[in-house]
Image (cartoon, rainbow, N blue to C red):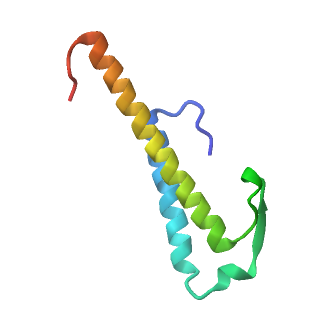
């Protein structure tokens, strides 16, 4: 996903869409097909993951990114409030 030039709202929407796609894929693989294929990942030495594990990893990662964006947004709102002395709703 290319984030360059995207506004925060667009990034958040794109991450939500990716999360939704991951969860849809998990629903489609409900009969155990996901264990038949493994893929290697270079993230923190995790090693090989089957399709279920990989999709779950991606869904968790997208969720973590969304939480980080919420924290950034809250912090930015606090700084704005401190600088103006007003609370924006």
Q: If the image is split into quadrants, where does the C terminus sit? A: top left
Quadrant housing residue 75: top left
Task: Residue at 56%, 53% (x, y): give it.
Answer: 61
Q: Position of residue 15 (x, y in %)?
A: 50, 49
Q: Is residue 32 above or below residue 5?
A: below
- Taking the image as shown, residue 65 lies to the left or right of residue 72, namely right
How many labels sit on residues?
0
Q: Position of residue 88 (x, y in %)?
A: 22, 24
Task: Residue at 20%, 22% (x, y): give it.
Answer: 87
Task: Residue at 58%, 80% (x, y): give it.
Answer: 29
Q: Nearer the viewer, residue 71 or 33?
A: 71
Q: Is residue 85 above or below residue 60?
A: above
Q: Nearer the viewer, residue 19 or 45?
A: 45
- Taking the image as shown, residue 12 lies to the left or right of residue 30, namely left
Q: Is residue 71 above or below residue 67?
A: above
Q: Position of residue 51 (x, y in %)?
A: 67, 72
Q: Nearer the viewer, residue 41 or 31?
A: 41
Task: Residue at 50%, 70% (x, y): give it.
Answer: 24
Residue positioned most to the bottom: 31
- Taking the image as shown, residue 79 lies to the left or right of residue 65, namely left
Q: Position of residue 41 (x, y in %)?
A: 76, 58
């Amino acid at each position: 996903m290319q984030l360059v030039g995207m506004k925060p709202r667009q990034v958040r929407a794109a991450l939500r869409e990716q999360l939704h796609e991951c969860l849809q894929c998990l629903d489609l693989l409900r009969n155990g097909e996901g264990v038949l294929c493994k893929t290697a990942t270079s993230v923190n030495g995790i090693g090989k993951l089957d399709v279920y594990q990989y999709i779950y990893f991606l869904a968790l990662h997208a969720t973590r990114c969304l939480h980080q964006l919420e924290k950034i947004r809250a912090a930015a709102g606090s700084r704005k409030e401190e600088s103006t002395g007003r609370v924006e709703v």
